[in-house]
Amino acid sequence: MEAHDLEKLEELESVGPADPIAGAVRKLIADLGEDPDREGILKTPARVAKSLRFLTSGYHQDIDKILNGALYSVAYDEMVIVKDIEIFSMCEHHMLPFFGRCHVAYVPNGKVIGLSKIPRIVDVFARRLQVQERLTVQIAETLMDKIKPQGVGVIVEARHLCMIMRGVEKQNSIAVTSHMLGAFRDCDVTRSEFLRLVKERG
């Protein structure tokens, strides 16, 4: 993280005595039938407030500041792919985590982006209350808008605790979503190459 991001995160994670999220968590603990003053739980509201602010910090991040001009003119028009980006997000329906991997590819159109910026863009949208479908689209459309490549492909594979811990309780289910733009949507060869490279394991 860059310095301005760390400062913003520290500000978001600060928990004072009148913190509204901590207060809400304390009430929730009591409403669930637990004693919020019990020794093991006494500091839980502050911890949860700090945790939630970190897990939703994507709302307060600026894509342009993250990119920080890291676009470079390069005579390269073959596929660039970053595989197996770890994602951790929270389902907006139950506020339970979902986690997995994101695969991102694009075909440059005169410019490439610093490779480290792609996982950071993924994190901006993952660190929000999300549905996997929207997360996939937001990553792809942001890259398409900011890099102006010939095309973008994004695939997200994730396990959802709202399905594993509750509801249907299916332990091994994985949700897969994809969003293809430009050459990845229009050209079968480009899309097939992306899918093949994603399946390959090093």
Image (spheres, rainbow, N blue to C red):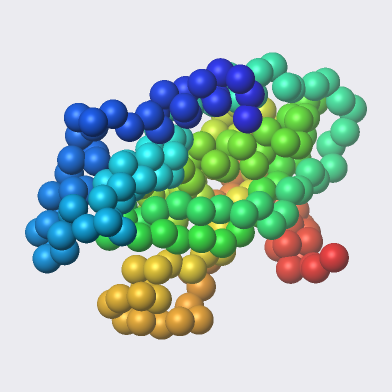
Q: Quadrant of residue 150?
A: top right
Which residue: 15% across, 60% down? 35
Q: Pick whichever, 84 or 189, lies toward us.
A: 84
Q: Can you give x and y, in whole percent of width and height, for residue 94 in the image?
A: 27, 60
Q: Can you give x and y, in whole percent of width and height, for residue 28 in the image?
A: 16, 54
Q: Can you give x and y, in whole percent of width and height, for residue 62 in the image?
A: 50, 23
Q: Pick whichever, 86 or 19, lies toward us.
A: 19
Q: How many marks?
A: 0
Q: Pick whichever, 73 or 42, lies toward us.
A: 42
Which residue: 62% across, 54% down? 86
Residue 132 against residue 75 in the figure, above or below: below
Q: Is residue 164 left or right of residue 199?
A: left
Residue 113 visible to the viewer: yes
Q: Quadrant of the C terminus?
A: bottom right
Q: Pick whichever, 74 or 170, lies toward us.
A: 170
Q: Quadrant of the N terminus?
A: top right
Q: Can you give x and y, in whole percent of width and height, for residue 30 in the image?
A: 12, 57
